Image (cartoon, helix red, strand yellow):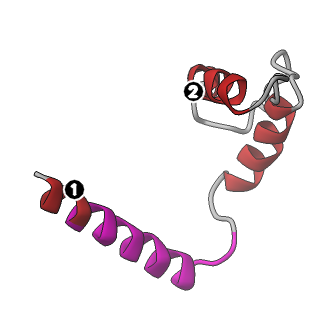
């Protein structure tokens, strides 16, 4: 089980690095996601770029991971 997980991790990293080398620039709507992510990290949850095709719920779901992790990492909330 552990060997399979390590193989999967290494394979995924290799694939990501290969794609990043072939397509180093943003493509499709990534440029809009970067701006949206910066807004969410700044705490601006009411703003949404209509050019993004991903549902906003995925951004909000990531807060379920970010908020507890930031609370564990420091005394202050870092979002």
- In the image, is residue 29 above or below residue 60? below
- In the image, is residue 15 above or below residue 59? below
Residue at 48%, 77% in the rendered image? 17
Label 2: which secondary element: helix
User: Which segment is the magenta one?
Assistant: 7-25
Of mark 1 and mark 2, the one earlier in the sequence is 1
Horizontal side of residue 73 vs 1, given as left or right:
right
User: Is residue 75 at least partly visible in the picture?
Assistant: yes
Q: Which residue is mark 1?
A: 5
**Quarter placement of the C terminus:** top right
Residue in the foreground of this view, choosing between 63 and 44: 63
- In the image, is residue 49 above or below residue 23? above
Horizontal side of residue 54 vs 13, given as left or right:
right
Residue in the foreground of this view, choosing between 38 and 4: 4
**Quadrant in the rendering for residue 27:** bottom right
Residue in the foreground of this view, choosing between 14 and 47: 14
User: Is residue 56 at least partly visible in the picture?
Assistant: no
Q: Is residue 8 magenta?
A: yes
Q: How many marks?
A: 2
Horizontal side of residue 22 vs 10, given as left or right:
right
Q: Which residue is mark 2?
A: 65
């Amino acid at each position: 089980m552990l060997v399979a997980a390590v193989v999967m991790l290494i394979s995924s990293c290799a694939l990501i690095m290969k794609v990043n080398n072939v397509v180093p620039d943003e493509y499709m709507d990534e440029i809009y996601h970067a701006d949206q992510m910066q807004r969410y990290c700044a705490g601006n949850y009411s703003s949404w770029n209509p050019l993004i095709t991903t549902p906003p719920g995925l951004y909000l779901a990531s807060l379920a991971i970010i908020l507890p992790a930031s609370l564990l990492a420091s005394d202050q909330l870092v979002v």
